[in-house]
Amino acid sequence: MTDSAPPLAGVVGWPIAHSRSPVLHNHWLRRYGIDGYYIPIGLHQQNFEDGIRALPKLGFRGVNVTIPYKETILALADTVSDRASLIGAANTVTFREGGAIHADNTDGAGFLESVRAGAPDWSAKSGPVLVLGAGGAARAVVSALLNAGAPEVRIANRTRQKAEMLAEHFGGRMVQVDWERAADAADGARLIVNTTALGLTGKPPLNLSLDAAPDGASVVDIVYNPLETAFLARARARGLNAIDGLGMLLHQAAPGFESWFGVKPEIDDALRRAVLPA
């Protein structure tokens, strides 16, 4: 990479056409007048390692990593942040001197920032949290919540074994809940989080009753297409504070952008409008 070459970054996954990250980062590049590019990169599994290792030679400063490579990238990384190691997945890669790969996970931090923006009075220490799902996103959310001081995290997943494995991984403050009892587990929860794909466009809805949720609780759906899921609409109808998934997407992106392009980006309504799916 020469000083005159425009800085490059991107997002790597397969498939990749669905990603809103190029819209997000290129909005920031235009906003701050940076002569750089953020490019979607579709890599088949058999080409993933060669493709990743070639990127620094092409002038890339780093990339976001999305499905299905968030776990795979850890095996290629030369250094891994503590939080990525704990979560067991990474979403943000920075290329260091000589093309060395540093892997980090900003999903959990992005989630917390999104909740704080949508519920300024909320604190992780204020009471139990119910998390629905036990995949990679759930691991990032749970890790962030525990690190922020949540006294108890209840985890419910359609496949019980995955919930049990996640609870065992994170230890003492975790409580595994059968999927059929998830609605009951909302009792006393100050925060209820859907990390599953239920409610995503083209997927079945999340049919979870919120009747047991206490007044003043906040409900988060990390799905952002559609922005207002049936689950969030039900939360609003119940009088609960509803937080959509777009904020997590925006906040998790900011650390990577700052690392690659040298500017700490602002997250505001103009960005939300730019990134919202058409």
Image: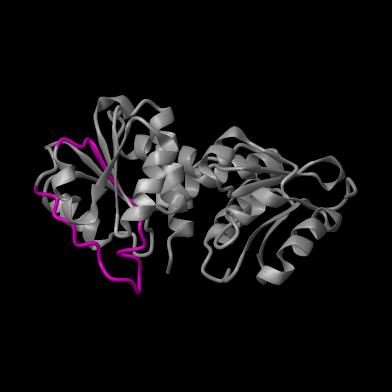
Q: Position of residue 216 (x, y in %)?
A: 16, 36
In the foreground, 124 or 164: 164
In the foreground, 223 or 135: 135
Q: Is residue 40 left or right of residue 47?
A: left
Q: Which of the 4 quarters of the picture holds residue 51?
A: bottom right
- Most common secondary structure along the magenta stretch: loop
Residue in the picture at 53% in, 40% down = 266
What are the residue bounds of the magenta stretch? 188-211
Quarter of the figure with the C terminus: bottom left
Q: Is residue 70 left or right of residue 262?
A: left
Q: Is residue 187 left or right of residue 176?
A: left
- Residue 134 magenta-drawn? no
Residue in the picture at 44% in, 45% down = 139
Visible residue check, residue 217: yes
How many numbered discs? Answer: 0
Q: Position of residue 87 (x, y in %)?
A: 51, 42
Q: Is residue 190 left or right of residue 3?
A: left
User: Relative to 69, is 108 above or below?
Assistant: above
User: Relative to 65, is 213 above or below?
Assistant: above
Furthest-left residue in this view: 211
Visible residue check, residue 43: no
Q: Position of residue 146 (x, y in %)?
A: 39, 31
- Residue 201 magenta-drawn? yes
